[in-house]
Image (tube, coloured by chain):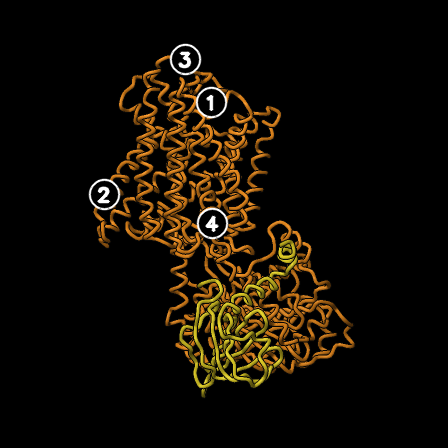
Chain colours: A orange, B yellow
Amino acid sequence: MSTTADAVKRLLVGSPKSSGELEHTLLPKVIALPVFSSDPLSSNAYATQEALLVLALAGAAGLNLILPISIAVATLLVIVVTSYRQTVRAYPLGGGAYRVAHENLGMYPGLLAASALLIDYILTVAVSITAGVEAITSASEALHEHRLGLAFLFIAFVTLVNLRGVRESGTLFAIPTYGFVLSIYLMIGTGIVRCLGGCPLAESAGRDLPVAAALGPLLVLKAFAAGTTALTGVEAIADGVPAFRYPQSKNAATTLTAMAALSISMFLGISWLADHTGVIYTALPLGQRSVVAQVALAVFGGGPLFYVIQIMSAAILILAANTAYQDFPRLSSILAQDRYLPRQFMNRGDRLVFSNGIVILALLAAMLIYIFDANLTRLIQLYLVGVFISFTLSQTGMVIRGRRLKPPGWKRTAMISGFGAFVTGAVLIVITYTKFPEGAWVVIAAIPFAIYGMRSVNRHYQEVGRELRRPDRRPTDRRPGNQHMVILADGINLATARAVGYATSVASSDLEAVTFDPSSSDAWRRAIPDIPLHVMRPGGSRTGSLRAYLRAKRRELTPNDFLTLLVPEVLTSRSLLEVLKNLGLTRLKASLLDEPDVQVMDLPITEDKGDHASLEIQQPLRNHVCVLVSGVHNATLQAMEFAETLRPTDIRAINFGLDPSSSERLGDQWLEHGIPHPLEIEDSPFRDIGSSLTHYVRQFKADGTKRVVTIVIPEFITPKRRHRLLHNQTALTVKSRMLLEEGVVVVSVPYHLHD
Amino acid sequence: MFDRLIEKFTQTPEATRATNLKEWADSIPETIRIKDIAPRCGCRAVGVIQKIRIDPRAGTGSVEVTLDDGTGRLLARWLGRSKLNGIALGKGLEVEATAGDHAGDELVVLNPSYRLMPGPDGG
């Protein structure tokens, strides 16, 4: 990366942290509580309102039911939290409903829970940001037309803070979360005291309320379902156990209880006050104050504390997004670990957060807000379905787990979980039924696609794993064939001279050159008479004719032989822009990766130092060959055999241990396969293979003429192009970094996966 | 307090890591920091496993482990074996042997006795 971009990145997200600092990023309970509770606590800002909205349809008689319904919702919350406390203990690696369902109910229920959760997290960001923006724009009408821009601005802000690290975002966002809790408690406390001498009345109290529906069981059920909004976000802690300080499970369980206590007391307090101040909230007219605002106005009488409540409510709504920012990246990293999502989701960024997940979440949420035009009423309809799918699956899974493992006291907890699963399942049906036409269908339609996508990623990874270990394609005889080389000459310059020097040191017997430039052929024959030059016929596609030429050549060779195309390149400046200028060549190299049994070797030099006359062809005296390995399989073995044909000074395999826990296994496999070359496993403390490799190759002090370093990269070539995004991302990084290193030659050894 | 804060913000990531490693190494009793090891002295050092090299080539084979304690690097080499159980990147390792010479910027010890321990990140 260029230094300017590096400096900007450091300024925005901070300087990189080493993997050893991971423990320093773990959250103490005081910070974990606001981090994971901003979502569940924020739902208190509107849960009572949602229930009142339904009850108001039945007139004043309906409103009397708000307290019993709130108590029922609170009881359900206790049940769900009890069940999740078991989950947190049983699954300390996080993953919540996904892991419980996957392990106890099977793959598809697991993926159902995972998709429901992922979709729900995206919705949490979209809904909470939109709600926050709405709170702001309702204060200032002028801002209304800029609501999309404002929403994107907030997303960018929350994203950036999260990219800075878990601790950093947690600490920053703890203040408004605790502020919200305190201000609500202050409101409830003041309200109760004032009610001792007769409650103050809300502005809407006693308003004429027409009866629009009969007060039947269905209406009560609907109101109850609406009130269960208070449960959203409860699953957040169960997903994020690994973010806690040790002992993780215990701390997570304690935090879960604290969160439940806060949530229940706030929710019941608000409902009690709404009941006693006589708040009426109906769908129309527009522009009513929210229930919390009405209660605050009645309790505080419009003083500064009223505005504190308003500001805190807006802040907590935006911050609810932060909980999703914690959990979406973590859940996607768990899914990537289980091979249901691309492996890139497992990478921790500079600040030890799962940066890819954070960025993807931000993009998807922004897209959703854009599609729904930052319209809260339409977005909020999509919500809740995912939450209750995951609640139901998770609790059912815990019941099955209890029956299977029979831990002490399992009957009691299984009964609680079972009852919880039954109630959340019932709520799920009610929500689906009532919200389906209003937008919930979008979520229900999206889930199968998400499941299908994860299933096919998984299937692909499994196939690749099988292909890489297929015994009939394993290069086992330790007598590799010969090396045949073809130089792609574009005129005669220092780069070609180096390529000729390199090639003659490796395969002096079978070496030829091809060119598309007929004018250089005489000069070539004078300068390098030993190597036959084949001039390609002009016209037609270069790639096509080169491919045909290589194929014809390949047919003459035995399957054990290697055919390598050498591509000398002159880069005039030390800049990656050069690669863009030379797109034709880059594309040519990329498309040759498709060609079975042809290796492409890159020999770049950074400036053209001299004219043809002074070109001296020199074979390198030392050629250190480094094979990059990620595991021991057919592709690695083939690359090792390729390396042996280069007549190197020495060969070594190197691995930059991005996953330290697997380093021991890698060493064992290396010995098991009896590969007669040293393997070096080196830690990359800042998880940056490009820099680690640069540092590594510089120890050879290669100059390109006397000493060269050859980096051999095994690459997987999948038959389907869309699968290629899943592979070789590291190879790309390495290639672009090594292009600018003096005296470094990079060669891709493709391993073609069959379908 | 401000000194520490300023230091925290101006340090390179590598320097921060070195400070953390040294702090961790200092917490392990009866060990000496790598840069303080005199050639040919008998001593006990500790460090986090930075690099593992296994060489199974014909004959004896060898295992090399590079340790980093924030003050320097120590290369422990075991000859005649190609496997050391439990060795993994990021773990802590305590080695005790007679130090060899400083080869380049690395100190080499041959066939030390060793003890595995959790690394600085607790893993």
Q: Residue at x 47, y 16 (%)?
A: A203
Q: Which labelled disc corresponds to residue A329?
A: 4
Q: Is residue A260 above or below residue A732?
A: above
Mark 4 or mark 2, which has the lower sequence index?
A: 4
Kindly indicate the quadrant of the structure image that contains residue A460.
Answer: bottom left
Q: CA distance from mark 3 to mark 2?
A: 44 Å
**Comparing labels 4 and 1, the label whose residue is closer to the camera:** 1
Mark 4 or mark 1, which has the lower sequence index?
A: 1
Residue highlighted by disc 1: A299
Q: Chain of mark 3?
A: A
**Comparing labels 4 and 2, the label whose residue is closer to the camera:** 2
Mark 3 or mark 1, which has the lower sequence index?
A: 3
Residue highlighted by disc 3: A206
Q: Position of residue B111 (x, y in %)?
A: 47, 84
* Disc 4 crowd, CA 10 A, few/some/many (<14, 14-19, 20+): many
Q: CA distance from mark 2 to mark 1?
A: 41 Å
Discs 2 and 1 lie in a common subunit: yes
Q: Which labelled disc corresponds to residue A415?
A: 2
Between residue A367 and residue A492, name the one nearer to us. A367
Q: Is residue A12 above or below residue A564?
A: above
Amino acid marked by disc 4:
Pro
Discs 4 and 2 lie in a common subunit: yes
Q: Position of residue A516 (x, y in %)?
A: 67, 66
SS type, badge 2:
helix
Q: Chain of mark 2?
A: A
Q: Chain of mark 4?
A: A
Amino acid marked by disc 3:
Gly
